[in-house]
Amino acid sequence: MVGPTTRPRRPRRSREEVSRALIDAAAELLAERPSGHVSVRDIAARADVNPTLVHRYFGSKRALMHAAIATAQERLAASVEAMPDVIDGAALVFGTVMQEKEFIAALARASLDGVLDELPSGNPAFAALTRRFAEELERRGSAGRHDVRVLTACLSSAVMGYALFGDFIRRGTGLDDEPAERVEAQIVAALQDLSRIALSD
């Protein structure tokens, strides 16, 4: 007689590992559908944890969503800080943003759902890029042609927009027959040119 089969026990995970799994799961699900269609149970199932841990570690689904957004912002800020040069390093930041497509999609959905309205003002990635541009102006002894915050806003809009709508943009501009890597390298070069012009007198 065969005994009852027992379900294999999950390996025990640390609080940090569970938090990370929940944040990643929330980001994935927010990129797939509106926040109103993402339940705590959905997030917990995707993270393979007990749903009670969402409330224990984050307090609420909304707080978890904010944590997912903040975590991605911190990754982007770290990429900006890692640039050896604020202009030549544009490819590094562009590449990081392209790796965060899921986060960009989640941001778009969260914005439509009003989730971003509850976030504190400021953004660590934007703040880091603005500071790097200001430092570059000081190094050059230049006043620049535009407010560095506006330059940051323009570049961020272009890169995040391309991360979200890259395929649509390439088709719409007749670039869909070009290798994506070539198009993206040219976009980086164009953004670098824009930065050089904006930072010059």
Image (cartoon, rainbow, N blue to C red):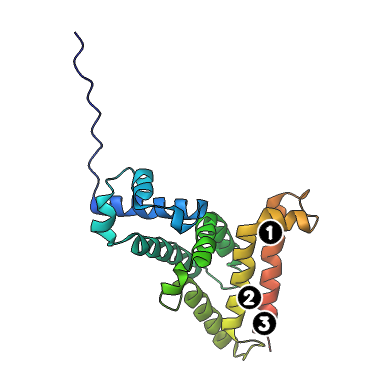
Q: CA distance from mark 1 to mark 3?
A: 20 Å
Query: In this rendering, is residue 199 above or below 178?
Result: below
Mark 2 or mark 1: whose residue is earlier in sequence: 2
Splitting the image into 4 quarters, where does residue 1 fall? Answer: top left
Between label 2 and label 1, give the one nearer the viewer.
2
- Residue at 23% over, 33% down: 9
Splitting the image into 4 quarters, where does residue 73 fall? Answer: bottom left
Front position in the image: 173 or 74: 173
Element at badge 1? Answer: helix
Front position in the image: 106 or 155: 106
Residue for badge 2: 154
Q: Position of 55 compared to 36: left or right?
A: left
Query: In this rendering, is residue 155 above or below 51?
Result: below
Contact? badges 1 and 3 (CB < 8 Å): no
Q: Amino acid at mark 2?
A: Cys
Which numbered circle lies on residue 76?
A: none
- Residue at 31% over, 61% down: 60
Residue for badge 1: 185
Mark 1 or mark 3: whose residue is earlier in sequence: 1
User: Where is residue 186 shown, x and y percent of the image?
Assistant: 72, 61
Residue for badge 3: 198
Query: In this rendering, is residue 90 above or below 154?
Result: above
User: Where is residue 84 shown, x and y percent of the image?
Assistant: 52, 69
- Residue at 73% over, 49% down: 179
User: Where is residue 63 shown, x and y percent of the image?
Assistant: 34, 64
Label 2 crowd bin: few (<14), some (14–19), many (20+), radius 10 Å: some
Label 3 crowd bin: few (<14), some (14–19), many (20+), radius 10 Å: some
Q: CA distance from mark 2 to mark 1?
A: 18 Å
- Residue at 69% over, 89% down: 201
